[in-house]
Image (tube, rainbow, N blue to C red):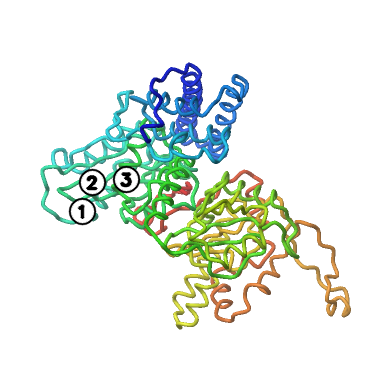
Amino acid sequence: MPMQHFPKLLSSQIAFDIARVVLDGFDKHYRLFRLASQAARRHFEQLTWNQAQSEARERIAFYDHRVRECVQILEDEYDEAELTDEVWREVKLHYIGLLTDHRQPELAETFFNSVCCKMLHRAYYNNDFIFVRPAVSTEYIEPAEGLPVYRVYYPARDGMRTAVRRMVTNFQLSGEFSDLERDIAQVEARMQAMLGCPAVEPNHQIQVLSSLFYRNKGAYIVGKVVNGNRDHPFVIPVLHNRKGALILDTVLSDTGMITTLFSFTRAYFMVDMEVPSAYVRFLRTMLPNKPRSEIYTMLGLQKMGKSAFYRDFLHHLAHSSDSFEIAPGIRGLVMVVFSLPSFPYVFKAIKDSFPAPKETTRELVKEKYLLVKYHDRVGRMADTLEYSNVAFPRSRFSDELLAELKAVAPSLVEEEQDQIIVRHLYIERRMTPLNIWLTEAEAAGDDAKLEHGVREYGNAIKDLVAANIFPGDMLYKNFGVTRQGRVVFYDYDEIEYITDCNFRDIPAPRNEEDEMASEPWYSVAKNDVFPEQFGVFLLGNPKVREVFMKYHADLLTADYWRQRKQRIKEGQVEDIFPYPQEIRFIYQSGHAAVAQAA
C-alpha cells in the first residue's frame, strides 16, 4: 500500500472493533466448518451415507450465512456516517495485526473481503480497503494442536509392509477390516511396482497427510513416497464391503487418475484441517499442474478458491494481450458465452430474455446453477465460479463481443471509463463441446475417438441419473470433453431431479389418424419424459447410433429410468467410482466391495 495511505497512528477504536467483529465472524465460520468436516468421519464409520451427503451440502452454505451475520452486526452497531474512508483503511490494518499467528490467515482475508464487498461500493474494491493481494504469508505455519500436517514413515528402516500397516492403522478408524493383512500385501505390491527398483536414497520415506479425505462412501489416504529428488504421489481409497467391513480398495498412483479424483466436476472433500494452506502446499507437490484455486475449492474452501482464481486471472490479464471473444460452438438460447483464447476458462452471462421454446427466467436459471453447486456432481457436472460486478479492460473486448452482450444482456453490462463491468457471470473450465469433438472425429475417420465420445456421453448420463439429476436438454452441444477425455455436462437451465420426473412410454396410436397426426394424441404434463423419443434428436448420425445402441440402448426405455427413480426414492446411494474398475483389488482377490468412492 502506498505510504501516503497509512494513517500516522492507528487511533480509531471503531476500526479496531470492526476488525475484531469480522475476525470473530470468520473464526466462528471455520470452527463450524471443521466440526462438519469432523462429522464426516462418524458418517463414514457408521455407514450413514444420506446424512453425510446432506451435511456436505449444508456445509457449503456456512460461509454465506456467517458473512450475512457479520454484516448485520456491523450495520446494526454503526451508523454509515461513522464509517469513513479513513476508518475503513484502519480496519484493514488492524485486521492484519490480528492475523499474527493465525492458522488460516488467507481464509480470514477472503472473509474480510466478502464482508467489505457487501458494505462498500465497488469503487472501493482496491488494495487500500480490501485484500486484492494477500498481506499475511502462509509459509511455515505450524499447527497448534499437536497433530502434524503429515506423518512420516520409513520403509527402508521398517520394511514397506510395516510402514503401510502403520500408515493405515494410525488413522484409528472404528470398525474391523475384512482382511487387513491381505490388503496391506496388495498395497505393498502396488507401491513396489510404482517405485520400480531405484537405489534407496537416505531420505527414502512415505509422507501421508494426517487427516483422511471423505466424500460420499469413501475415505482416502493421501500421500507420497519420497526417494532422493523424486516424489511418487499416491491415494488409497478405504471403503466398506457388502458386510460393512473395511477394505483398502486400490492404490491410485497415476497422476491422471489422482487429478480426476480432485476434479472440478466432483463434490468437495470433507477434510479436517487446522492449517489448510499446508494441505494445499502438500497437494501441489503431488499435482503441480493443478491451480491452487482448484485445490482450495476441492477441499471445500470454495470462497478462497474464488479469491485465488481471480488473483490468477488478474495476473494473466497483466501478462497477456489477446482479446475476449465469443466462444466457439453453437450459441445458446439462455447464455452468452465468451472466452479469452489464452485462458483455459469460459465466461457465461444470462441473457435478459429467452426465445421459444425456452420457458424460464434469470432467477430460475440462477437457482439451477445453485442446485448444481450444492449437489453431488459425480464427476459429470462442471463446478462454476459465480461473480458479481467483474471489471474487464474495454481494450480487451472485441467489438463483436461487446455488441453481442449489449444486444442480449444489456441489463448486465455497463461501460465505465476504460472498463466493461459485467454485473453477474459464471466462470467454468473450458472444454471441447461434444458436438465438435464428434464432428472432428468423424471428419478424421477416427472411429475409436468417436466411439469413446459416444460411450462416455452415455456413461455421463447414467452417472447423472445415479445422482438424481435429469439433464433436460441432452443435446451434444450441452456436454464437453475434458483434457482427460471425460464427458461432462455443463448446461444447467433445464435440469430436474429424477424423482420429480414422470418417465412414460408413448401410448400406442388408437387409429390411423392418431398415427398420422402432427401433434401427440396423448396428454403431456409438464414433467413427463418419453425416453424412446431421445433417439429422434440424438441418433440421426448412423455411426453415432450404432455405438450408442451398442452401449446405451437402455437409455431409450422408460423402464430404465423408472427403475433408477425407484432406487433413489428408496434412499439407495449408487456406487460411482472416480477410478477405473479394473485397477481395484477386487479383481485380484475377489472380495466384494460396493461402496461408492466418488
Number of the label disc, if any, that sits on residue 183? 3
Closest to the camera, between mark 2 and mark 3, is 2
Number of the label disc, if any, that sits on residue 195? 1
From the top left corner, tell me how far across and down residue 252 is, in percent: 34, 52
- The residue closer to the viewer here, 418 or 42, is 418
* Type of amino acid at the residue the image marks with label 3: Asp
Q: CA distance from mark 1 to mark 3?
A: 18 Å
Number of the label disc, if any, that sits on residue 225? 2
Question: What element does badge 1 sit on?
Answer: helix
From the top left corner, tell me how far across and down residue 406 is, in percent: 64, 60
515 left or right, relative to 195: right
| Mark with earlier residue (1, 2) | 1
Characterize the local packing of mark 2: few (<14), some (14-19) or many (20 or more) Cα atoms within 10 angstroms: many
Looking at the image, which residue is at 60% across and 19% down?
77
Closest to the camera, between mark 1 and mark 3, is 1
Question: What element does badge 2 sit on?
Answer: strand
Residue 51 seen in the figure: no
From the top left corner, tell me how far across and down residue 115 is, in percent: 53, 32
| Mark with earlier residue (1, 3) | 3
In this view, 225 is above or below 129: below
Q: CA distance from mark 2 to mark 3?
A: 18 Å
